[in-house]
Amino acid sequence: GLFSQFVQLLPLLMLFFLSFFNFPGEDVSTHTGGSKYFSLTHSPPFVNPLSTKLTPVKDIPYFVTDKFMRTYYRDRYQLSQVERMVEKSYENYLVAECKNQQIYKKSLEKSAMERSGMTQADRERQMKKSSRVRVVAVCGVARPIS
């Protein structure tokens, strides 16, 4: 019935819900930077776009405040410290996204195997969909296979 369909969709709903909010005990920095100096997302007061130049990983986009631009931007030492924080926050974000993709892929596989009332063709389509989600462990980002 309706309840059993809801229970079957629950893991997928939880995945989407958790991807929009922080996990318990997770640092805010995985999504926005969680810093008074920068944010990984454009949102006031973080309106000035920059990208990393002084860290080993170049071109990570981030946003800073007007005050940051006036006080820290010209200080190479301070800027390098902030860019290291940006790099770490971005790494944390990628790791979290990788985990979310792994959970999503497992939920697709589980759904295909456990659904009652599903024809063999539907089950095979669901498994094929699951196989198109490839988790790239090197960089922590999942992308569909083209």
Image (tube, grey):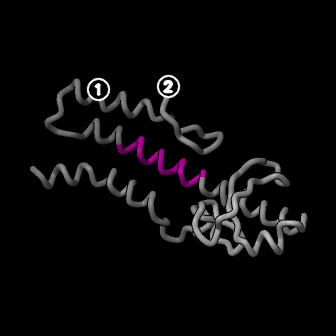
Towards the viewer: 91 or 51: 51
Q: Disc 2 designates what residue?
A: 146
Which residue is located at x 48 percent, y 50 percent?
100
Please tell me whether residue 117 is drawn above or below residue 50 in the rendered image.
above
Question: What label does residue 124 carry, if any?
Answer: 1
**Mark 2 residue element:** loop
**Mark 1 residue element:** helix
Q: What residue type is labelled 2?
A: Ser
Q: Does the magenta stretch include residue 98?
A: yes
Please tell me whether residue 27 is drawn above or below residue 146 in the rendered image.
below
Q: Does the magenta stretch include residue 56?
A: no
Which residue is located at x 51 percent, y 50 percent?
99
State which quadrant residue 36 falls in: bottom right
Q: In the rendered image, is residue 27 in sight?
A: no
User: From which residue to which does the magenta span run?
Assistant: 94-107
Report the magenta stretch's main SS. Answer: helix
Towards the viewer: 129 or 110: 129
Q: In the rendered image, is residue 34 in sight?
A: yes
**Distance between the alpha carbons at the discs numbered 2 and 1:** 19 Å
Disc tally is: 2
Which residue is located at x 21 percent, y 40 percent?
115
Question: What label does residue 29 carry, if any?
Answer: none
Residue 85 x, y percent position in the rendering: 74, 64
**71 sits left or right of 40 in the view:** right
Query: Which is more N-terminal, label 1 or label 2?
Result: 1
